[in-house]
Each structure stands twice: as structure tokens, then as C-alpha cells.
């Protein structure tokens, strides 16, 4: 493998310096290895040639597939001028005809294809003015007998490549050339794993992933390569977390002292839920182990994470350390501060709030209190990790709403002490298990899967634009009962201006519709002071309606708000809708979430919205979201450090392989943490090869 990775792609027969540059620029392919691991994203069955007369039926049965047709061109014709120039041709096969269109290289194409010659064309027919047409098909001269060719890989290539005549066909040829010269490949997997899963040899898998000899061989190749990818990913994560926990000690918190006990016995206003108790136990076990804790705490909105965080911070204090909790926004930090200082002060712990808007004077005082150790708990935003902040003995860091903190910021926190503080990362965005295993593979995970008793689930309904008046009447009835209402508009970056106009129009309409009530207005582009002012109007009850973008998604707590109306709900992801819905249902009164959508939405969109009306279980919603959108779009993955550079495995679909690969990797690491036993040297070497040039993400968090 190493030698393939060291051989520049320019030496491959058919490439050369120019094409090598193009391959690197467009697809990131620099070496033989890169091309070998550039897998097809789809396969066409070369033995199957469709009839044009079958297209209509194929199209009606679902999405039109990429397919092959065999026939001849007739009637080439150039239309348009300049940049709009295009070449049209009729392609017929005896059962019917379709249109074929080219927008580029019109002249060259016109010269190279001829009438009266049999061609195979390959592409995805689309219906246009009730006629099928294919744009930029792959075209080759039909040679009798070539249908037996079986499966052929289809690669994703760019327009720029096509323009420079590096077509799909040419690309396939390059892969063929490569497969002819790769020689022997040492299989990095241990023999017992290969035997256990009856894997085909790596070399066979690589050949068959590109040019499958049969459907069965393709499946076996896919299985093997997915496993490889996930296995080495897990092996890498587990090796790092193991070596970290062996190398780096952690503060040992063994005492359960006065602060914790006083709080538990005298201050805690309600019994803990079973899940909260279990999680606190897990955290205590970690913090008492002498190893640094790196734990992810997942729990739905309202499941009581803040309380768990507070109690763990009290443990740190009982053991002579300081603790801090970081929130992603000022408003959240403020809210945490209010909750936490109110509770902690009752057991004699001093709490400080440190954010970007803390005055210079105040800041200096806090810095002094932190350095002297007088301040036990600090609540803050990014301001907390500024270099000037020095703690006397920081033993515990809680990060709330993890996904809003970048990796680099956590790294900074980490470097504040020689013995690293225990880290508890809290998130209300439920992450499907398989995703957590991959993205946070080196963190331990605790889950609060139980809501405090007495919560009424939020009633969720889907309503279309044409029922707006009824919806407004309902809102009016809630307002009359003294409740408050959120109205949320989508704001997506691409068309911010337009969205903002929607939001402003919405604000005007709402004010006109509910003239007796005060409406406040919040969006992300506001100055922080103005935003805080508007938020405050709502939190204090002076305003009864808040019109906002998703800035209110995280954390804001107004128990009197009972209605969450989400405009253009079809434009939100499920997890985001779930987060928004979590803003209501926080008080004693029955709450409602109304998803407004256009009448005309695709059935998949309708299905997605209906998931919301059917369940309030955040994990189920997250699983569904991942299934529908794919893991790349899931919140929490973008900044998580592990870029989704998986070639073939699919986190949403390959859960079982992930689990198996993780178990296997765990077994090996438990037995040989440094991979230095002779039988594991091959593994160590492969990890070195795969990950040496990457960042050591696992040191972060
Ligand atoms: P999260 O941060 O997980 O969204 P919070 O910690 O803000 O949830 O808790 C939501 C609300 O539930 C708070 O008002 C909190 O006081 C309350 N709460 C937390 N734990 C319990 C419990 N065990 N029993 C009753 N209420 C609880
Ligand atoms: Mg919270």
C-alpha cells in the first residue's frame, strides 16, 4: 500500500502531468493509492440494454435509473448562440426515440458521432415537455458481444474533467490500467478476523469494487471494504483513548463531601430521576478512577442535564477543585448562571459569570477570584477560555451544547492545566448510537433517557398555509389564557436577505393580527444588546409573542410559553424541529407545536414532518433524521473533528458493521494497547499509514 501511495498518478498509463493535475485538482487524486480507493458510487449492468419504449414505465415505478440504450443518432441540430449554444440529436432504437442534448463541445461532438452507426449511450433520462431526453450521455460505439461485460462502475467526475475530455469512459479505462499494475497487496487484517467473516482477500475486494465479476462478488467486496474502513477507524480511536487514559492521569475525586451532601439532602427541590442517578454514578466512577474523564452526556431537552452538571461540579469542589461550565451563547450562560448560582449559593459555593460583556472591572475581580481559588464555579462563554483566565485548581469542565464549540476551542481548554480537568460534554441533540460511536468514538457516553415525572408531551400538529386563520384563532385563545407564543421563521444562509424579509413581513403580520399583545423580535444579525433586550421582554412576560429565527433554538427557558409555531417547517431538519419544540412544554400547562407548511410538499417531506407529530422521543427522531438526510448533515458532525472522509461505509446504514468492527478493535486494544505484539505489528503499521498525516483529534475534548 505504501508504495502505491508513493507513486504519483502521473506515471499511470494514460495519465501524464496534465491529467494528473486535473485529477488532483478535481478529485484529490494524487497517487495510485488515491485512485484505487476512489470507488464507484453506482454500477450499471452492462448486460442490460433498455428499450426506449420501456422508459415511461420505468419512470413511473419510481426514480428513473441510469441506464443503457442501444441505437443510432439521427438529425443532429445546433441551436442557440454563444454560451447558449447546444447540440440536439434524436436517438432511436426501433421502439421509440428520445432527445439527446449537449451543451459543451458542440462542434467536437457533432464531428465525432455519426448517423448510421450503432451506439450504446448511457445516462439518466429525464422527462421534458412529456418527452424523454438525456443530457451529456456517455457514448460508445456498439461492439457486438460487449453486453456480456457485466457490472461496470460509475464514478463521480466533474464537468471540468469532462470538458477536458477526461470522461467517465476514460476514467474507467484509467482504473483498468491501474488494476493491471497494482501487483501484490498485503492484507492488513488479522487472519482470524478474515476467517471469521469469510472475507475475500483485500486485493480481490479492490478489483471487484471497481469491476465486479458478479453481483455476489460486488457485495462481498463492499462488505470487506466497509469493514476495513470502520475497523481501522475504531482501532485508531480506541488506541488513542486508551493511550491517553494510560499516559495522562486525572484528578482523583474520591470524596463525596459536604457540598454535595448538603445539596442533595437540603437544597435539591425534587427527587432525581432514575436516569439522573445512574448518570451521576457513571460520572463519579470515572472521576474516581485516577484517569481523566471524557464523557458525553446526552439527554433530551428538559431531561435535567444542568442539575447533573451542577452536582458533578459540587463533587469537584468537595475534592478541593474548581469547576466551570461553558455555554455557547451569552443568553444561555446568563440562564445557567441564574439557576446555578441560586442553587449553589445555598451550599456556600461562590459562582461567577464571565462572558464577553462582563465589564473590565468585574472581569479583573473574577480573574483574581479564580486565581485565588475563592470562586468555586464559573459560568461563561468563550470568554472563559481566553488566555488571561487562570484557575487556581481547575478540576472539572462542563461544556453545554457541545456542537457549537469548535474543536480548537476545546483544545484550548485542555491545555490550561498539566493534569487535564475532567470533561463532561453535554448535548441535547440526540446522536444516534452508531454516529456517536464514530464521531465521539473516544468519548464515553452517558444517556439520560427519562424525563422528570409529570411532563406532558407537547402536542404536535402539521397545518398547511390554507388553515392559517384557524391557527391564528387557536393562538389567540392561548394568549387570552395568559400564555406566551413563539413564532419561528427559517433563516438559511444562502438567501439571508430574502429570509430576513420573510421574517420582517411575518413580524408585521403578527402585530396586525394580534394588536392587543406585545410582539418582540429576534434574529441572529441583531446587535447582542438589542437581542438581549428583546429576549428579556419575552422572558419577563412583557411581550407575549416572540417572532424569531432559530436563535432561540438552544436553551431559552420560558415556562409560560405554550405554543411554538414554526413557519416553513418543511425547510427545517428533524433534529432542529425537535430542538425548537423543546422550547415549550417546560411549564405546568399543556403545550403545542404547530408545524406550518406549504400545501405543495413532496411526500418525503410530508413523511418527515409527520414523524414529528408521531413521536417526542429525541433519539427516534435523530435516527430518522440520519436515515433521511444522511450522517453528513447531522448536527454535531461538521465540527466534530472527524471529517466524514469515509470512502464506502455509511454511518446511517452500516450500524451493524460499525458495532462488529468496534468490538473487534476493542478486543485487540484491550489485549495489546500499544499494538506492539508481533501479531499486531501489521495493524500498527496500517494505522500509521492511514492516520499519521492526520491530526490527533482524540487529544482534544
Ligand atoms: P436540560 O438542560 O437537560 O434541557 P434542565 O436541566 O434545564 O434540562 O431541566 C429542565 C427543568 O427540569 C428544570 O426546570 C429543572 O429544574 C427540572 N428538573 C430537572 N431534574 C428534575 C427532576 N429530577 N425532577 C423534576 N424536575 C427536574
Ligand atoms: Mg440545558
Image: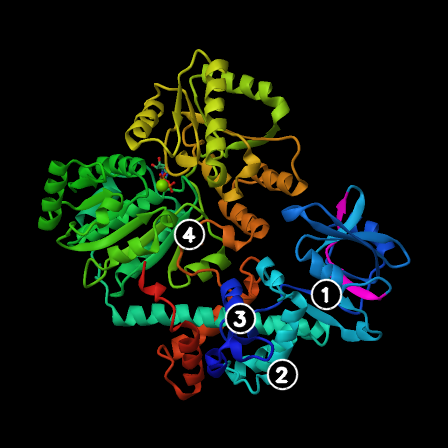
* Label 3 neighbour load within 10 Å: few <14, some 14-19, many 20+: few
Quadrant of the image occupied by residue 589:
top left
Residue 425 horizontal/vertical position (percent):
34, 52
Secondary structure under badge 3? Answer: helix
Q: Is mark 2 within 8 Å of ligand 1?
A: no
Tell me if residue 311 is in the magenta stretch.
no
- Crowd class of label 2 (few under 14; some 14 to 19; many from 20; radius 10 Å): few
Mark 1: few/some/many CA within 10 Å (<14, 14-19, 20+): some
* For residue 57, above or below residue 440: above
Which residue was labeled with disc 2? Answer: 180
Cα separation, mark 2 vs mark 1, equals 22 Å
Instruction: Please tell me the numbered disc located at residue 447.
Output: 4
Sequence-earlier tag: 3 or 2: 3
Q: Is residue 189 above or below residue 371?
A: below
Pointers 3 and 2 in contact (C-beta within 8 Å): no
In the image, taking residue 673 as reference, residue 419 lies left or right, namely left
In front of the other: 134 or 372: 134
Q: Sequence-wise, which precedes: disc 3 or disc 4?
A: 3
How far across and down, in percent of the image, does residue 339 sit? 27, 36
The C terminus is located in which quarter? Answer: bottom left
Cβ atoms under marks 3 and 4 closer than 8 Å:
no
Which is nearer the N-term, disc 4 or disc 1?
Answer: 1
Residue 412, given in percent of the width and then of the height, sits at: 25, 56
Amino acid at each position: 500500500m505504501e508504495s502505491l501511495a508513493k507513486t504519483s498518478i502521473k506515471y499511470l498509463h494514460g495519465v501524464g502531468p496534465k491529467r494528473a493535475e486535473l485529477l488532483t485538482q478535481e478529485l484529490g487524486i494524487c497517487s495510485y493509492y488515491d485512485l484505487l480507493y476512489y470507488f464507484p458510487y453506482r454500477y450499471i449492468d452492462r448486460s442490460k440494454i433498455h428499450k426506449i419504449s420501456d422508459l415511461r414505465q420505468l419512470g413511473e415505478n419510481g426514480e428513473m435509473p441510469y441506464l443503457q440504450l442501444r441505437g443510432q443518432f439521427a438529425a443532429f441540430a445546433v441551436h442557440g448562440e454563444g454560451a447558449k449554444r447546444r447540440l440536439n440529436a434524436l436517438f432511436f432504437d426501433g421502439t421509440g426515440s428520445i432527445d439527446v442534448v449537449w451543451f459543451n463541445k458542440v462542434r467536437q461532438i457533432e464531428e465525432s458521432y455519426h448517423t448510421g452507426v450503432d451506439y450504446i449511450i448511457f445516462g439518466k433520462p429525464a422527462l421534458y415537455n412529456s418527452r424523454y431526453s438525456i443530457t451529456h450521455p456517455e457514448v460508445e460505439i456498439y461492439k457486438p458481444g460487449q453486453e456480456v461485460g457485466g457490472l461496470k462502475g460509475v464514478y463521480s467526475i466533474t464537468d471540468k474533467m469532462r470538458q477536458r475530455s477526461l470522461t467517465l469512459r476514460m476514467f474507467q479505462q484509467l482504473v483498468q490500467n491501474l488494476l493491471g499494475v497494482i501487483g501484490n497487496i498485503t492484507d492488513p487484517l488479522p487472519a482470524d478476523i478474515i476467517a471469521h467473516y469469510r472475507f475475500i482477500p483485500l486485493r480481490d475486494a479492490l478489483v471487484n469494487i471497481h469491476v465486479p465479476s458478479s453481483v455476489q462478488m460486488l457485495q462481498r467486496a463492499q462488505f470487506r471494504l466497509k469493514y476495513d474502513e470502520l475497523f481501522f477507524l475504531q482501532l485508531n480511536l480506541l488506541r488513542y483513548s486508551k493511550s491517553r487514559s494510560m499516559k495522562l492521569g486525572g484528578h482523583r475525586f474520591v470524596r463525596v463531601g459536604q457540598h454535595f451532601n448538603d445539596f442533595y439532602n437540603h437544597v435539591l427541590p425534587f427527587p432525581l430521576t432514575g436516569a439522573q442517578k445512574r448518570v451521576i454514578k457513571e460520572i463519579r466512577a470515572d472521576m474516581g478512577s485516577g484517569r481523566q474523564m471524557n464523557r458525553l452526556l446526552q439527554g433530551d431537552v428538559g431531561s435535567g442535564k444542568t442539575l447533573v452538571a451542577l452536582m458533578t461540579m459540587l463533587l469537584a469542589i468537595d475534592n478541593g477543585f474548581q469547576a466551570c461550565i461553558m455555554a455557547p451563547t451569552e443568553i444561555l450562560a446568563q440562564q445557567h448562571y441564574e439557576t446555578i448560582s441560586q442553587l449553589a449559593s445555598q451550599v456556600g459555593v461562590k459562582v461567577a459569570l464571565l462572558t464577553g460583556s462582563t465589564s473590565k472591572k468585574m472581569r479583573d475581580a473574577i480573574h483574581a477570584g479564580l486565581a485565588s481559588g475563592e470562586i468555586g464555579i464559573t459560568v461563561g462563554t468563550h470568554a472563559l477560555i481566553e488566555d488571561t483566565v487562570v484557575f487556581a485548581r481547575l478540576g472539572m469542565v462542563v461544556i453545554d451544547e457541545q456542537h457549537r464549540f469548535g474543536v480548537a476551542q476545546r483544545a484550548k481548554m485542555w491545555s490550561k492545566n498539566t493534569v487535564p480537568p475532567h470533561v463532561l460534554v453535554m448535548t441535547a441533540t440526540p446522536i444516534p448510537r452508531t454516529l456517536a460511536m464514530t464521531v465521539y468514538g473516544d468519548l464515553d457516553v452517558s444517556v439520560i433517557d427519562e424525563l422528570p415525572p409529570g411532563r406532558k408531551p407537547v402536542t404536535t400538529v402539521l397545518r398547511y398555509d390554507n388553515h392559517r386563520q384557524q391557527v391564528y384563532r387557536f393562538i389567540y385563545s392561548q394568549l387570552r389564557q395568559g400564555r406566551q407564543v413563539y413564532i419561528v421563521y427559517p433563516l438559511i444562509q444562502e438567501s439571508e436577505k430574502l429570509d430576513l424579509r420573510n421574517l420582517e413581513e411575518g413580524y408585521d403580520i403578527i402585530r396586525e393580527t394580534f394588536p392587543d399583545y406585545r410582539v418582540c423580535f429576534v434574529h441572529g444579525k441583531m446587535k447582542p444588546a438589542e437581542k438581549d433586550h428583546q429576549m428579556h421582554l419575552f422572558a419577563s412576560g412583557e411581550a407575549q409573542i416572540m417572532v424569531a429565527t432559530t436563535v432561540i433554538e438552544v436553551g431559552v427557558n420560558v415556562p409560560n410559553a405554550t405554543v411554538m409555531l414554526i413557519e416553513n417547517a418543511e425547510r427545517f431538519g428533524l433534529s432542529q424541529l425537535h430542538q425548537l419544540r423543546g422550547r415549550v412544554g417546560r411549564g405546568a400547562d399543556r403545550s403545542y407545536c404547530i408545524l406550518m407548511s406549504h400545501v405543495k410538499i413532496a411526500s418525503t417531506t410530508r413523511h418527515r414532518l409527520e414523524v414529528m407529530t408521531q413521536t417526542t422521543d429525541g433519539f427516534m427522531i435523530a435516527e430518522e433524521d440520519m436515515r433521511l438526510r444522511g450522517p453528513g448533515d447531522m448536527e454535531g458532525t461538521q465540527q466534530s473533528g472527524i471529517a466524514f472522509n469515509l470512502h464506502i461505509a455509511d454511518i446511517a446504514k452500516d450500524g451493524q458493521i460499525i458495532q462488529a468492527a468496534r468490538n473487534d478493535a476493542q478486543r485487540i486494544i484491550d489485549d495489546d494497547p500499544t499494538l506492539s505484539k508481533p501479531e499486531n505489528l501489521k495493524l500498527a503499521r496500517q494505522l500509521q499509514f492511514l492516520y499519521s498525516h492526520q491530526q490527533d483529534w482524540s487529544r482534544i475534548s
